[in-house]
Amino acid sequence: MAKKNIIIAETPSGEKIEINAKSAKHKYSVGDIIFYIVDYLFFIIFTLACLFPFYYLFINTISDADLVTKGMVNFVPKGINLNNYLALKNVNDLGTSLIVSVLRTIIGTALMVAASAFVGYLMTKDEMWHRKFWYRFLVITMYFNAGLIPWYLNMSMLGLTNRFAAYIIPGIVAPYNIILVKTYIESIPKELEESAFIDGASYITVFRKIVWPLSKPILATIAIFGAVGNWNSFQDSLILMPNAPDLYTLQHRLYIYLNSTSNIGQMMNSAGGGGMALDYANNGMIIKYTISMVSIIPILMVYPFMQRYFEEGIMLGAVKG
């Protein structure tokens, strides 16, 4: 019969010893308790400080417009309604900008992940021609760039202004992501690839059937980086699309609205919006809040599904240099 509060442990040499469970428990000193209390309080406050702006934005978008204008909505929504969101259907070009941002995020992220995976795998092969030179050249580009004006001139000479391709092509090669993928692939046992080569598999087959499936954590990690970057970017749209308003991203459109509150009424289709549209057109702050929330929601919905891969991928991809 087993004794109460007794734990049977085995030493590295195989010897079994008995440990009193009560004595094995860690005893916290007064200093430890104070430290943990302060630590938890700090992170709770920090978390709330990060979440409150999103919460504040959300409760103002579902509250009564008059109460929001008067500054009476601070912690709890008042006069809950969805009219603010319904009014957005009358904002000119918002739907087009949403489609542009969605396409840019999906296509740009997919191509970036595929390129990062393939080039990262290529960088792990000693057979690659001047591998060390190309790897160092790739790293250097992370620290040095020509600047905004030469970048614009280069994009202009390549004919990428006022074209959707300007959102996709420059972001396909992402040095930091390639380095993460390379480091992760190097952690995969080489025996898996060697056994496949013995069976007659080519590099493409090994990459497609072994490396790609085993690299899902790091690929999901860089996919988060790429999706967030593509979704939130507006500077390239601002600079490269001066004569193509149909190609403005959602963030660019939001930037325009934030800087033209006084003219928000002109951005509404009064013919289709009726009285409600005109009422909300006179309240630029509500429209700004609502559009800001709409631009945040999609990426917030995607992130939780990728979270389980994120920690594993970023840690394993950063162990080696």
Image: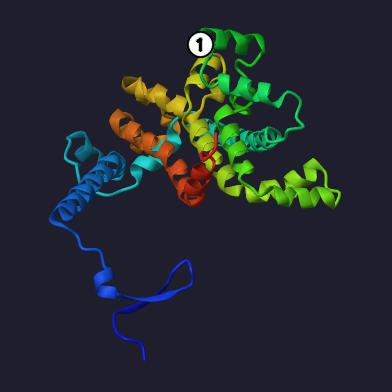
Number of numbered tags placed on the structure image = 1
At x 61% / y 13%, what residue is drawn?
Answer: 155
- The quarter of the displayed image where residue 291 is located: top left
Q: In this view, does 274 lie to the left or right of 283?
A: right
- In the displayed orientation, state which residue is furthest to the bottom: 1
- In the displayed orientation, state which residue is furthest to the left: 30
Q: Position of residue 162 (x, y in %)?
A: 60, 17
Can residue 164 be seen by looking at this rendering? no
At x 53% / y 33%, what residue is drawn?
Answer: 101
Q: Is residue 253 left or right of residue 177?
A: left
Q: Which colour scheme is used?
A: rainbow
Q: Where is residue 147 in the image (x, y as percent from the top left)?
A: 51, 11
Between 170 and 178, the one nearer to me in the picture: 178
Between 148 and 176, the one nearer to me in the picture: 176
Q: In this view, does 75 lie to the left or right of 187?
A: left
Q: Where is residue 179 in the image (x, y as percent from the top left)?
A: 58, 32
Can residue 184 be seen by looking at this rendering? yes
Q: Which amino acid does label 1 sit on?
A: Gly
Q: Is mark 1 on a helix, strand or loop?
A: loop
At x 51% / y 28%, what residue is drawn?
Answer: 249
* Residue under label 1: 147
Between 222 and 88, the one nearer to me in the picture: 222
- Position of the N terminus, as image quadrant, is bottom left
Q: Position of residue 119 (x, y in %)?
A: 68, 33
- The quarter of the displayed image where residue 223 is located: top right
Q: In this view, does 114 lie to the left or right of 218?
A: right
In the rendered view, tell whether residue 21 sits above or below residue 165. below
- Position of the C terminus, as image quadrant, is top right
